[in-house]
Amino acid sequence: MRELDVNSLIGPLAAACIRANRELPAEVEAALRYAREHESDKLARQVLDTLIANAQLARDSSLPICQDTGVVVVFADVGQDLHLVGGDFYEAINEGVRQGYREGFLRKSVVAAPLSRAPNTGDNTPAIVHVRLVPGERLRLHVAPKGAGSENMSALWMLTPAGGAAGVIEAVLARIREAGGQPCPPLVLGIGIGGTFEKAALLAKEALLRPLGEASEQPEVAKLEAEILETVNATGIGPMGLGGDTTALAVHILTYPCHIASLPVALNVQCHVARHTTVEL
């Protein structure tokens, strides 16, 4: 069994928060360029050109890709043979976020009281942390700042099993039409199917971590991903809601066994600034 001082993750996590907000993942930028080359609408091409230029400018000038630098979501894969020592694991994560958002001059967007909206915590903590036990003795942190514009357009449904794949498509399509340009398309859609009320939502969030456009290993699920992507792009909502062929860049679905009487479905909407990075210790 290996020991790891939790304080050793603070610096790398702070750097990851800064990096994620400044550098769009290569596969996301590639998807934007692909969409631009295959876009038939002139205005949509201009919007995509602007999004691509913005990503380059953020990287070159060390500025945030978007003014909404998000709530920090961390998926922590903790090796079951790893012994964490030296303090509180969650507080170490929050200290990493605290330092990253201060040192990177990133906007602090977290309020302590969701109803009164005050006060602002002043350092973008606390982070949203999901811990998963995995084989081995290493710690891997998936860091994904999540902006509110897209998060607010997310949804969850408790469908009847009779609805099947058609019911999933209908629910997702209705929500995307309702959202229009509000979540800043082109989008990445994370969808969780199965489990329970809370498990479906977590699956949807986790699905966004998959490399962009990588299809599910399950043929039935991969087929549904392709169908939803085609249907969503046929809405014509287009980049930033101004019309065009590209409303979504990718659809990622994760599934989980569920009760015979349930079909939980969750949609986690991600804007074109699909930020995430990984730290391994």
Image (cartoon, rainbow, N blue to C red):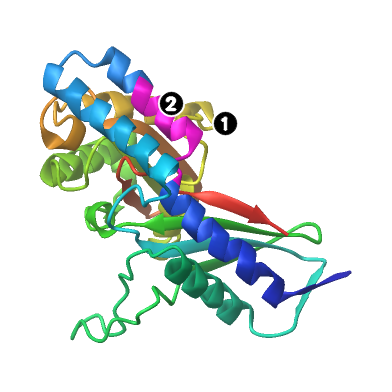
Depth check: give the residue in front, 168 or 39: 39
Can residue 3 be seen at all in this image of the molecule? yes
Label drawn at residue 217: 1
Residue 30's disc is 2
Question: Badge 1, how many Cα within 10 Å: few under 14, some, many 20+?
Answer: few
Q: In the image, is residue 74 above or below residue 62?
A: below
Residue 269 x %, y %: 30, 48
User: With 115 as the anchor, is 5 left or right in this view?
Assistant: right
- Front: mark 1 or 2: 2
Residue 159's label in the rendered image is none
Quadrant in which the C terminus appears: bottom right
Tell me the chief SS of the magenta region.
helix
**Residue 232 is at least partly visible in this image:** no
Q: Nearer the viewer, residue 5 or 205?
A: 5
Residue 144, relative to residue 254: is it above or below? below
- What's the residue type where badge 1 is placed? Glu
Given the image, on which type of amino acid does mark 2 rest? Ala
Question: Which residue is rendered at x = 69% and y = 85% of the image?
Answer: 87
- Give the CA separation, mark 1 to mark 2: 22 Å
Please provide the residue range marked out in magenta. Answer: 23-33
Residue 207, percent across and down? 46, 46
